[in-house]
Amino acid sequence: MIRKHNKTFLIFDNSITLRSKFNTGIQRTVKNLQYNLDGKVINNVHIKFSPINESWFDRFDFPGFSNDKHILSIFLHIVSIFFHIILFIRTSIFGRLISSFIFFNKTFYILLLHKIYKNNIYFVFSDSNWTRRGYFFLFINKRFFGNKNFCIFYDLGPYKYPNFFDKYLVTKFTKFWNKTYKLIDKFICISDTVKKEICLHWNLPAAKATSFNLGSDLSYKKSMQNFYKVTSIDPYKNYLVVGSIEPRKNNEYILKNFINLLDNNKALSNKLRLIFIYSNSWKSDNFFKTLNSSKYLNKNIFLLNEVSDSELKNFFSTSYALINSSIYEGYGLGIQEALNYNLKVFCSNITVFKELYNDNAIFFDIDNDNHLKDEILKDLNDQSLFNANMDNVLTWNQSALNLIKIINNEIQDTYNSK
């Protein structure tokens, strides 16, 4: 006879991070949260990261079921075949989609087993999984099993600036969230700015959303970084631009300002480098046209693709500053990562950057064509040593624990209301 567990489990989705090569801020967030939380038990809550579209043939990699593996294997095969036959014979397309989802989805069986074991389940929609399966899982988890759904929400980019994204992504993202936001019990946003945006966009009550700060671990000694800047071991000052090349990032603004800076200050061509590090790009023909026609390409301006995390750390540790000219962001994780290496930060004066980096950044107005160039020149004439104020910057472990604290409070409120 199968014993009841009466345990509490918290499942995080890592579908896209696990199965893709993307390394955006979302994937870096999921990877670091998983590294700090997966498999742990905090305040009697068992935490597990699992892709919600994982195959049912690999369904036993989950805490709490290993001891009953053989019994459950037989049981699950019988149940899965039963569901598949019953639902597939329905003539409606919806019935067949549900059938396909259930038959091939590992986490559906995990939820079913936990229901049998009388365990409490809470789900965190944490990855960029804006697919039909993502919606079906959230729907089944809430409506069929009666479990709570949390969501780590990153930004409203495709809603606010649809012209910056591929039409397919905009359609997929907006269709998904137009029907899915009602299935979320609590939005946990990555900044207070995003929290306010989604409450206004979907007319959510303030209690429906909260926010937490992301982490960024210190892995380089500030004293060594300061030594690099004082002694000028490398005669060049490297300015980094890290992230995808796309209209929202406004990279062409940086490129034109830097070219203008070198054109009007010939001596700086032996002192400054601009390095773009990116993983993917879209809708940026003008940027590449300007770059490829520049006489500074591969002399003072460089474009690097598919840089590993370890290589990125090397660039951070040997560079002078980071530049971010984004028109819209949910957080700007690259800025925080740069500050951990005590880099100077030049960034656009958008609301979220003012919220998060007001004490540590040199801001410029992207509506002023030459403002970035002017700020770089002003900084070059300033000999004072920069030290980032890291008092409010968290490690990923601290960030992860803060997230769990928010969720635990919600769980406790659920228990108290019963």
Image (spheres, rainbow, N blue to C red):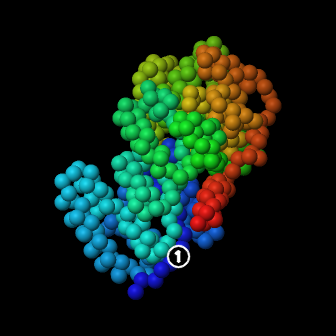
Residue 376, by quadrant, is top right
**Residue lying furthest front in this view?**
418
The residue nearer to you, when weighing 254 against 382, is 254
Whether 179 is drawn above or below 408: the answer is above
Query: Is the N terminus in the top left, top right, bottom left or bottom right quadrant?
Result: bottom left
Disc 1 packing (10 Å; few <14; some 14–19; many ≥20):
few
Residue 354, horizontal then vertical, whole percent: 69, 33
Does residue 276 appear anywhere in the picture?
Answer: yes
Give the residue at x 40% y 51%.
134
**Residue lying furthest bottom in this view?**
1
Residue 34, horizontal then vertical, whole percent: 54, 59
Whether 275 is drawn above or below 182: the answer is above
Disc 1 on helix, strand or loop? loop
**Residue lying furthest right in this view?**
384
**Residue lying furthest top in this view?**
264
Give the residue at x 65% y 34%.
353
Is residue 303 rendered to the left or right of residue 336? left
Does residue 194 appear anywhere in the picture?
Answer: no
Residue 414, by quadrant, is bottom right
Residue 26, horizontal then vertical, whole percent: 51, 46
Give the residue at x 43% y 78%.
66
Give the residue at x 67% y 23%.
364
Whether 282 is drawn above or below 40: the answer is above
The residue nearer to you, when weighing 31 against 106, is 106
The residue nearer to you, when weighing 31 against 92, is 92
> Mark 1 belongs to which amino acid?
Asn
Identify the residue under disc 1. 6
Is residue 312 rendered to the left or right of residue 86? right
Is residue 270 rendered to the left or right of residue 137? right
Residue 416, horizontal then vertical, whole percent: 63, 65
Query: Is the C terminus in the top left, top right, bottom left or bottom right quadrant?
Result: bottom right
